[in-house]
Image (spheres, helix red, strand yellow):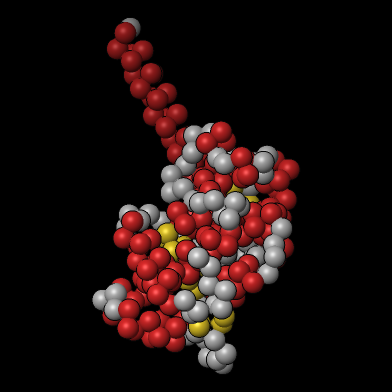
Amino acid sequence: MFDDFLNEAVIDDIKKDYFNFPIVLLKEFLIDDRECLNNIFDFAIYSYLNKEYESDFSQIKEAESFFGVNIGNKRRSFDNGKTLFESIPENLPFIGIRKSIWFDYYKNQKTEYQKVVLLAFIAIKSIVGKKTHCKTNNLLWYSRMEGNSHTVKNVNELSPELSEYFNEYQSKKIKNELILNWNLKHYAYYTRGFYVSFKMTLEDLIFMAEKNRKSRLLKKVKDNEKAAIKRAIDRLYKM
C-alpha cells in the first residue's frame, strides 16, 4: 500500500507548501503513522485533481508538478485518494501539514513522543484555524490529536496510546516542546484552559487573554449590580 518510491521532486521553486486534509485522517496515527501519512498524501493529490481537473487521472502529472513531488504508484495513490475523498464528510475540520514536515516523518524513523508532538502541533493548528489566537482546553486538544472533530467527554474515550499522555506532566512537556521548537505562544495563568497562537507575540497573546478576563469580570460586576438592584426593588414593593 505504501509508495516506496515517493520522493520530493528536485526543483528549486516551491509549488505547494502544504498537504491539506480532514482531521479524521489522523486516527490511529500512533498505531500506523506510515499509513496515515500515505492517506494524507493521497487525499491531497486527489483533492487537487478533483478541484482542478474534475478527477481526471490522466492529469496526475499536473498534481505532481503542483505539489513538487514524484508519485511512485500513481494509480494506487489516485484510487486511495478517491476512496477517502468520497467517504469523508465535507463538514469536518481541515488542516494542512507542511510538505517538509510530512517528508521528514515519512522518510525518517520517529519515536512515539515525536509522533505525539506532531499530533499536538497539528491539533492546535486546527483549533486556531484562521484566527490569530484562541482559547482551548486539554480535552479538545487531545480530541483533535485523536482525529476527532468533537470534544470527548472524558479521557476514557481516547485511545490507550494517546491517553497515556493525558496528564499534567506530559501535557506540560508537550506544550514546552511546541513553544521551544514549533513557534507556539502559550498562556494559561488562571485562565481555566489556555490561550494559544502561532501568529502573535507572547506579549500580545497575554494582552488579549487579560483583556478577555477584564471583560468577563466587568460583565460579572454589571450582572451582580443588576441582580442587586432587582432584589432591592423587590424589597421596596414588599414593604
Position of 136 with respect to 51 (left or right) is: right
Image quadrant in which you'd find residue 224: top left
Image quadrant in which you'd find residue 80: bottom left
Task: Kindly identify the residue that appears in the image at 44 percent across and 83 percent down.
Answer: 64
Q: Residue 188, percent across and down? A: 63, 47
Q: Residue 159, percent across and down? A: 57, 41
Task: Kindly identify the residue that appears in the image at 42 percent across and 23 percent down.
Answer: 228
Residue 16 visible in rendering: no
The residue furthest bottom is: 12
Q: Residue 177, percent across and down? A: 71, 58
Q: Relative to the observer, which residue lies in front, 226 or 162?
A: 162
Q: Residue 111, percent across and down? A: 71, 58
The residue furthest top is: 239
Q: Relative to the observer, which residue lies in front, 161 or 138?
A: 161
Q: Relative to the observer, which residue lies in front, 177 or 16?
A: 16
Residue 28 visible in rendering: yes
Is 164 drawn above or below residue 48 in the view shown?
A: above
Quadrant holding the C terminus: top left
Task: Kindly identify the residue that appears in the image at 55 percent across and 40 percent down.
Answer: 158
Position of 68 with respect to 92 (left or right) is: right
Position of 232 with respect to 204 (left or right) is: left
Could you tell me how many numbered marks the image carries? 0
